[in-house]
Amino acid sequence: MSEFLAEESNDYFWNFVDTISSIDLARALGADSQDEELFHLGIRNAQQLLTPMGVKLMKFSLSIRSNSPKIEMFNQIVKDLPPPDDCDCFVEIHGAMTCRIDQIKTLISTANNRQKPHIFNLDHSYPGSNGPIIVVLYGNFGQPGSSFPIFHQYLKNLITRGEITYILRHYVKEQPDHKVRLSGYGVELAIKSTEYKAVDDSQVTEEEDNIDEFSPEGEDDVQGFVFSTLRKKYPDLEDNLKQFRTHLIDSSLSTAPLKIWQLQEISVQAAQRVLSSSTDDALRVMRDVSQNFPTKARSLVKTHAKKEIKDEIRKNQDHAGRHLGLSPGEAMILINGLQIDTDIADPFMLLDLFRGEARLMEGLSLLGLSAENTKALMQISAKSNEDSFAIDVRDHAVEYINDLETDKKYNHWLRSVQDLLRPTFPGMLRQVRKNLFHLVSLVHIVF
């Protein structure tokens, strides 16, 4: 969280550090689920610094662990030192290290005799600390029972006297043994024919797809439910029983074999499934279908795609092909009108893009613009309709510094354009007395 805040503002970072280090974490956090409680504690304090949109982006950043490499870099620096024994927090003063407060003054007084440490761009310097002595504090301010608050407050007092430059680097002494689980990036449905038969698919009709699910060839007992008995007792619920039976079969099978003709409109059927859900559940259903597509395929092929949906998809495909160069079956991400290539897009690039768009929208909001006006401005294309322009160099406003066609010093050059085809040594310019290439500089002379 602190690294995310540091990317927003150095003051945000240090305000967060001051707030967390001033809390008695051992008392504020329970004995169980300390990580979860520490997470909610950090979110509550970050909400005081960030906008609601910024908090959501910070949660997204935490989910993909975008700042974990920075933390690991600081841990690797500590391993190369190496750190003092049995210290969860220590300071480095021009190459000398200690985890005792009473030794800091002594090391500062002799620091000029030692070489200054190297400062990285990712280091966090306390605001207003520009003293001649560089003091680097290694510690974890989010660890209950840590000595970090004591060191932090002591170094802040030295800053007020103008003695030191205070640098903070993260140091996690005891790292958990369990492996970190990253967010998944999705799965795909690999289509492969397992039927090695000579079958004429052109003779197959959709009637084969509409076989009665309660026919004798089908299973009657599915996960303890006898559907023949249920069908007799509740004949008016036959459609619901079919859907329920299909759901039970899908849940019992990870994947189900499908005919190739069943997959012809599966993408349209998936869109129909999402659009048929309620407004509140549409995003959840889309995520569920996209992330579990192979296991959902069998139920999707039984979804009836409406003609209106098919017409709308064809219209969108035509528009995307003419204006975006997108062929049917290809994908593209559009964020506030910006085209993102899905072949190179990754969660980290999207996070940076979201943060840039969020700053722009928040800046427009601070100007007093309404949500409707902000949306309208964000949709304006910043790209000019004309990719290039031309300047008429024959205009009297264009003054030549060197005119190949009229200057006397170029009299010995040949005038024929055909000389451009004459072979020359590599790197040599063709000496043709024609103003073929121009560099026009727009200069405003102020007297």
Image (cartoon, rainbow, N blue to C red):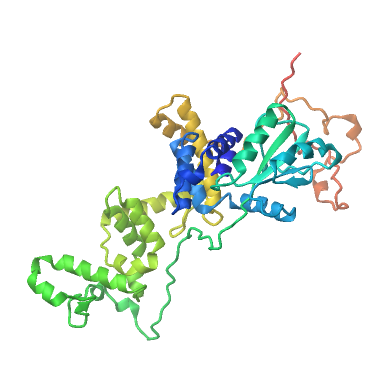
Q: Which percent across, then down, holds residue 301?
A: 30, 67
Judging depth in this view, the residue of 133 and 221 nearest the camera is: 133
Q: How many marks?
A: 0
Is 435 displayed left or right of 283 in the figure? right
Is 84 displayed left or right of 412 in the figure? left
Judging depth in this view, the residue of 376 and 239 nearest the camera is: 239
Q: Residue furthest top?
A: 447
Judging depth in this view, the residue of 227 and 172 nearest the camera is: 172
Q: Residue at x 27, y 60 (%)?
A: 305
Q: Which percent across, then down, holds residue 18?
A: 57, 35
Judging depth in this view, the residue of 137 and 231 nearest the camera is: 137
Relative to 349, say whether 356 is above or below. Answer: above
Q: Residue at x 9, y 68 (%)?
A: 234
Residue 156 visible in the current orientation: yes
Is 325 displayed left or right of 102 in the figure? left
Relative to 277, say whether 356 is above or below. Answer: above
Q: Residue furthest front?
A: 102
Q: Which percent across, then down, holds residue 352?
A: 55, 45
Relative to 408, say whether 335 is above or below. Answer: below
Q: Quadrant of the C terminus?
A: top right
Q: Residue at x 56, y 63 (%)?
A: 177
Q: Which percent across, then down, holds residue 345?
A: 54, 53
Q: Quadrant of residue 126?
A: top right
Residue 336 visible in the current orientation: no
Q: Quadrant of residue 196?
A: bottom left
